[in-house]
Structure formats: structure tokens, C-alpha cells
Image (cartoon, rainbow, N blue to C red):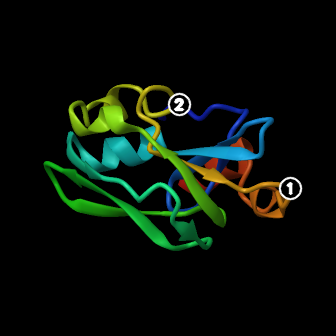
Amino acid sequence: MAEIPDDLRFTRDHEWVRLGEDGVARVGVTAHATEQMGDIVYVSLPTVGAQVAPGDSCAELESTKSVSDVFAPVGGIIAAVNDGLADAPESINAEPYGQGWLFEIEVGADQAGIDALLDAASYRASLD
């Protein structure tokens, strides 16, 4: 089974979220998702400053097998994108929880959306 870090929250669509102390949530796709997609060759990221709601399609990953939407796991404002992925989309496959992160969402004080996501144990169970 693919790696599933215990300190993250997850969606059923295989996105992960790491909430920083500054109210900014870093978002990426899970190792399980990258295994299913195959080698990622192109990434389309959201625009910094864009407002997103939970479930909004806000990024796209193109792999050797398919094109997949990435959905906002929480609502807020896109605070940053991982510009390094334009030249190295394979970072998502190599380090999905590290250098392969996709974007950050400023969620501010309303962190209820994060709490509503799956914890690592629940995400593991959803894969069985």
C-alpha cells in the first residue's frame, strides 16, 4: 500500500491537506493517486488570488494514462502555487507529500472544513 502520512487530512478524491500554523492549507495528491495515474507529464494550476469553494475543480494533472481534475478540499483563496511543477511535473510522482505539492489555500480562522476531512486511518480504510 502507498504511503499515507498520519499528520495529513484527506479527501475521498485522493487529495491531501496539511494545515500550517498561519491558516494556510497546502494541498497535493496522494501517493495512491499517483500510482493510479502513472507518470504525470503536465500540470495546470489555479491562479493565485482565486476564490475556491470545497469541491471546485481547480487544477488538472495530465499523466501518461489520463487527465485528472484536482478538487479544492476546502474553501478559501489560492495563496500560492508550486511553480516548480511546470518544469518538473514528475515531482508529484516522486514526492507527492513533499516537493510535489500543488497549491496552497488561505483558509483563515474557519478551519471546520479541514476538520471535516478524513484522517489517515479513515483514508486508509477507504482504500480497502
Residue 14 in the figure: left or right of residue 115: left
N-terminal label among 1 and 2: 2
Residue 72 in the figure: left or right of residue 122: left
Residue 51 in the figure: left or right of residue 57: right
Numbered label tally: 2
Crowd around label 2: few <14 · some 14–19 · many ≥20 (10 Å): few
Q: Secondary structure at mark 2?
A: loop
Residue placed at 66% from the left, 46% from the top? 25
Residue placed at 32% from the left, 29% from the top? 91
The answer to whether any part of residue 128 appears in the image is no
Q: Amino acid at mark 2?
A: Glu
Residue placed at 50% from the left, 62% from the top? 13
Residue 28 in the figure: left or right of residue 59: right
Q: Nearer the viewer, residue 55 or 84?
A: 84
- Residue farthest to the left, as pictured: 64
Crowd around label 1: few <14 · some 14–19 · many ≥20 (10 Å): few
Residue carrying label 1: 109
Residue 34 x %, y %: 35, 43
Residue placed at 80% from the left, 35% from the top? 21
Residue carrying label 2: 3
Q: Secondary structure at mark 1?
A: loop
Q: CA distance from mark 1 to mark 2?
A: 30 Å
Residue 114 x %, y %: 76, 56
Q: Nearer the viewer, residue 48 or 36?
A: 48
Residue 93 x %, y %: 33, 33
